[in-house]
Image (cartoon, rainbow, N blue to C red):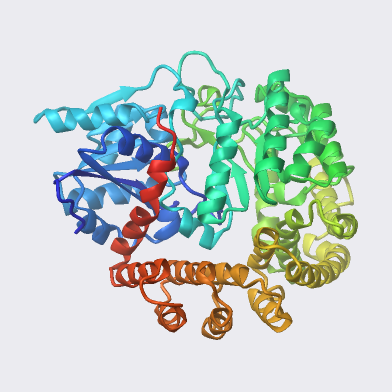
């Protein structure tokens, strides 16, 4: 059990694991809970301790939940609920009440902001915080502390908060986030001025607005995480990193110049709308490290875009795609191919465009609108009473039987026909691998060569995709005599294109490995720190083992990079590699080995460090002793204690409003 000398009350903030049916996801930090933790730590630090536990990062099966509650012994547990984790959240609240009925449950997140109080009652709440919670959480805790008998506290943040007075998010979970997926999430703004009818993200206040943070403070936060956590790849979670205004463009340009001036080589990605893609600006952003852009395209049919109130045109989408492809910036598209009203002409509109541009098409063909509760679309959709309702999601049927049949066929193509085709499965894996490697080629002498081959590879894959897309079009339009057996079509036509694309992709990966090995061996530590992340690629022909063996054989002197890469190593040779690193170690390298050993819970590496310490009484000896003590703790205690240990200096470093 975690205790404090002054008997502070304990607040445990939990992000439940994703529902079992949500599929594979990149589980980035829950910044919302991090901001809540920062607020309590800054404003109620004399009376409350805060602990963060993100199940999607450190406990995806929620095996340690009960021991976690016993360890922390919290008076209060706050949950961040979305439709993606609602069922796990439901199981969690049941467990909390069975473990200790006296614990107060505080609900926050999108579900708490969009569902009615009666619907949220299944989570046994003692308090519901709607909207931004950084101020309200302190108010709720003070009410709990001062009043014995309270009914349900249900509060709403009616006015939008000043984003420059929130401080930086607490990053308790970041070390383990980086271990799984070396990308740091960060927020540079809040709010969205648009009113897309399918969007369920609540807006604070009566007026929808975009609230950008001071851009110098954003870059300062990047500098801090780069120095403290060695973060080199950032993803901005903003709904819109840029909006269509002169001031926003100038801010984005200032951001690029600040990153180039104040940070070592980094990569970053963000979300924005097609209308904001300006070639001159994005060329500058790419020079600063922009590698990927998420575009919520949804459809290439203008009637569909109008139905979603996107306030965008197909022409704007095409212009944005052209510019990003020309600049060599990866496009991550959001798509909604089917909704309750989808018609065959609308499907034809989108297919016509997909077949003419360099764009990932086939993977989007069975995407279906999710009708989230609280959206403008919800009131227009006729509910489907024949299926069980989902928490926070409204089920529906297609209005046109023809569309429903087509959607069912598209699902069968993916989950029954393509899922058993080895060439297609390999294509999906290799496509992911090339997309993973792409950011590390940006702004290098081999970028043009990589992009030329990558484009050719995608062209081959798309040629196979278009055969399937044409079959779907023929089926939708009931083209006589054109709809042959889908399995025969895959076997005789599409497979050969996918296979040729796969062969080229494997050659690109082989070239990439050789290129980065040679490049890293001659780089400074800061340059190598970024490029070495390419070797976290989940592909057995591009392994961290090769990085260690190559650099050690070359005696490249980049031992600090290798010490830091031990964090990502999952093979059987860590002892051997560590031994070679420590033979050439200074205090900085030893500290990096201790950090990697701690976060991977590798006791053997810590034992090796004992023999490499230069002399007793040093800072590294203190770090080693701390690591040994932490490793004796149980799993929940270990995670929470490590977070507290790493956060001690972070709270001091954060700006206080």
Q: Position of residue 54 (x, y in %)?
A: 40, 52
Q: Nearer the viewer, residue 465 or 517?
A: 517
Name of the residue lying farthest toward the top: 206
Quarter holding the N terminus is: bottom left
- Residue 333 can be seen in this image: no
Q: On the rendered structure, is 318 left or right of 525?
A: right
Quarter holding the C terminus is: top left
Q: Position of residue 576 (x, y in %)?
A: 55, 86
Q: Position of residue 487 (x, y in %)?
A: 78, 64
Q: On the rendered structure, is 74 left or right of 331?
A: left
Identity of the residue drawn at 77% across and 47% down: 361
Identity of the residue drawn at 45% across and 16% down: 205
- Residue 484 can be seen in this image: yes
Q: Toward which corner of the image does residue 625 lie, by quadrant?
A: bottom left
Whether residue 409 is situated above or below residue 547 in the rendered picture: above
Whether residue 595 is situated above or below residue 25 in the rendered picture: below
Identity of the residue drawn at 37% across and 30% down: 133
Q: On the rendered structure, is 233 left or right of 229?
A: right
């Amino acid at each position: 059990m975690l205790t404090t000398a002054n008997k502070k009350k304990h607040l445990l903030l939990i992000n439940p694991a994703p529902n079992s049916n949500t599929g594979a996801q990149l589980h980035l930090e829950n910044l919302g809970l991090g901001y809540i933790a920062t607020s309590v730590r800054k404003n109620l630090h004399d009376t409350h301790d805060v602990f963060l536990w993100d199940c999607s990062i450190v406990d995806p099966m929620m095996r340690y939940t009960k021991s976690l509650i016993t360890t922390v012994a919290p008076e209060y547990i706050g949950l961040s609920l979305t439709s993606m984790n609602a069922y796990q959240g439901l199981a969690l609240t049941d467990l909390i009440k069975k473990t200790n009925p006296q614990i107060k449950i505080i609900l926050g997140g999108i579900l708490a902001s969009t569902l009615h109080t009666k619907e949220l009652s299944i989570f046994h709440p003692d308090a519901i915080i709607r909207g931004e919670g950084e101020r309200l959480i302190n108010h709720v805790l003070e009410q709990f502390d001062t009043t014995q008998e309270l009914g349900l506290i249900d509060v709403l943040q009616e006015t939008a908060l000043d984003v420059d007075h929130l401080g930086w998010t607490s990053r308790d979970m970041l070390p383990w986030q980086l271990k799984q997926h070396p990308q740091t999430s960060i927020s540079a703004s809040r709010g969205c001025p648009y009113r897309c009818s399918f969007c369920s993200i609540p807006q604070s206040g009566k007026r929808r607005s975009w609230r950008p943070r001071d851009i110098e403070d954003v870059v300062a936060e990047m500098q801090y995480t780069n120095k403290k956590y060695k973060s080199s790849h950032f993803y901005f979670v903003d709904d819109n990193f840029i909006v269509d205004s002169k001031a926003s463009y100038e801010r984005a340009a200032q951001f690029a110049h600040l990153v180039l001036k104040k940070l070592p080589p980094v990569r970053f990605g963000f979300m924005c709308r097609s209308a904001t893609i300006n070639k001159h600006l994005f060329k500058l952003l790419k020079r600063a490290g922009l590698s990927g852009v998420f575009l919520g395209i949804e459809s290439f049919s203008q009637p569909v875009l109008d139905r979603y109130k996107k306030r965008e045109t197909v022409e704007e989408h095409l212009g944005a795609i052209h510019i990003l492809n020309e600049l060599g910036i990866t496009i991550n598209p959001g798509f909604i191919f089917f909704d309750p009203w989808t018609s065959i002409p609308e499907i034809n509109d989108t297919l016509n465009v997909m077949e003419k541009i360099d764009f990932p098409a086939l993977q989007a063909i069975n995407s279906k609108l999710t009708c989230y509760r609280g959206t403008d679309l919800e009131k227009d959709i006729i509910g489907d009473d024949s299926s069980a309702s989902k928490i926070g999601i409204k089920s529906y049927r297609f209005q046109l039987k023809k569309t429903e049949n087509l959607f069912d066929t598209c699902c069968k193509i993916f989950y029954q026909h393509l899922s058993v085709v080895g060439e297609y499965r390999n294509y999906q894996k290799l496509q992911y691998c090339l997309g993973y490697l792409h950011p590390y080629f940006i702004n290098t002498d081999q970028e043009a060569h990589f992009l030329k081959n990558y484009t050719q590879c995608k062209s081959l894959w798309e040629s196979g995709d278009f055969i399937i897309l044409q079959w779907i079009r023929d089926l939708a339009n009931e083209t006589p005599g054109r709809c042959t057996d889908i399995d025969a079509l895959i076997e005789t036509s599409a497979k050969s294109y996918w296979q040729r694309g796969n062969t080229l992709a494997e050659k690109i990966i082989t070239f990439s490995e050789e290129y980065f090995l040679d490049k890293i061996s001659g780089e400074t530590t800061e340059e190598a720190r970024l490029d070495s992340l390419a070797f976290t690629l989940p592909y057995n022909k591009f392994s961290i083992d090769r990085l260690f063996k190559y650099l050690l054989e070359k005696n490249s002197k980049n031992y600090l990079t290798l010490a830091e890469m031990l964090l990502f190593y999952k093979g059987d040779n860590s002892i051997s590699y560590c031994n070679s690193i420590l033979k050439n170690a200074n205090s900085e390298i030893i500290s990096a080995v201790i950090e990697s050993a701690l976060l991977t819970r590798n006791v053997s590496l810590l034992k090796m460090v004992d023999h490499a310490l230069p002399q007793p009484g040093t800072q590294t000896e203190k770090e080693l002793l701390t690591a040994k003590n932490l490793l004796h703790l149980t799993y929940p205690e270990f995670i929470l204690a490590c977070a507290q240990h790493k956060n001690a200096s972070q709270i001091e470093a954060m700006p206080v409003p």
